[in-house]
Image (tube, rainbow, N blue to C red):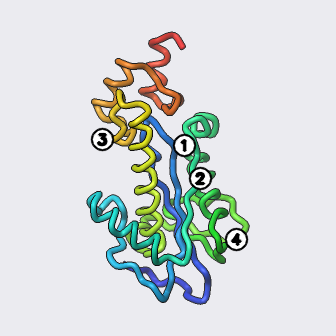
Amino acid sequence: MNDPVDTSLLVAGVDEAGRGPLAGPVVAAAVILSADLPVDGLADSKTLTASRRGEIGASIRRRALCWSVGMASASEIDALNIHHATLLAMRRAVLSLRTLPELALVDGRFTPALPMSARAEIGGDGRIDAIAAASIIAKEMRDDLMRRLHVEYPQYGFDAHKGYPTAAHREAIRRHGVSRCHRRSFGPVRDCLEAEGV
């Protein structure tokens, strides 16, 4: 997979999870891999089973030079929009790294405002190991957070759909209303609030 990257630079891969859900934060991860401790099996998190993603995620956390996570909450998503909230989460992830990189490679078309060089990489999670690692960490962390939210709000089934707009989730919103962790600016949630006269 690994696209050539200038090995003279300290490079962080950056990716996010959770742009599309109706609830919960958007989570970004930044990962600087170690040249001395390679991680086997790196791939776009969307192509991996949950169990395989968990195995590789544990390996990344053990073997990476450093990694970090940044989030933007549902209320920040509503205030900023999902695009700008995603960039905010990415910025928080990069700036939380124990060692700051010289270059951030960011999956997608846009990069957050950063104090170091940054480059957008369309499809980077399928081509560049550091971005693939970030995609796995972001997905693992967000799924874990949604499982914890499920304990607080079991009526929505967050443990199953992780906040995505499944038929079951939409029905739960209609039946139980909107929780504090729902994104009020997203259509199905907004429609429910309007129906309730909120």
Q: Give the residue type at disc 1.
A: Ile
The CA distance from mark 4 to mark 1 is: 23 Å
Q: Give the residue type at disc 3.
A: Ala
Work out whether mark 4 precedes mark 1 in sequence or the reverse, and give the earlier one: 1
Query: Which residue corresponds to mark 2?
Result: 89
Local secondary structure at mark 4: loop
Query: Which residue corresponds to mark 3?
Result: 160
The answer to whether the residue labelled 3 contacts the one labelled 2, judged by CB atoms less than 8 Å apart, is no
Query: Which residue corresponds to mark 1?
Result: 82
Q: Decide: is 151 above or below 56.
A: above
Local secondary structure at mark 1: helix
Q: Decide: is 134 above or below 142.
A: below
Query: Residue 88 appears at what percent x and percent y?
Result: 63, 51
Specify the label residue 116 is tagged with.
4
The CA distance from mark 1 to mark 3 is: 22 Å
> Which quadrant: the N terminus?
bottom left
Work out whether mark 2 precedes mark 1 in sequence or the reverse, and give the earlier one: 1
Q: Give the residue type at disc 2.
A: Ala
The answer to whether the residue labelled 2 contacts the one labelled 4, judged by CB atoms less than 8 Å apart, is no
Label 4 neighbour load within 10 Å: few <14, some 14-19, many 20+? few
The CA distance from mark 2 to mark 1 is: 10 Å
Query: Residue 198 appears at what percent x and percent y?
Result: 54, 14
Residue shown at 39% from the left, 79% from the top: 39
Query: Residue 47 appears at what percent x and percent y?
Result: 29, 62
Q: Decide: is 109 above or below 167.
A: below
Looking at the image, is mark 3 or mark 2 nearer the viewer? 3
Work out whether mark 3 precedes mark 4 in sequence or the reverse, and give the earlier one: 4
Q: Which of 75 and 111 is in front in this view?
A: 75
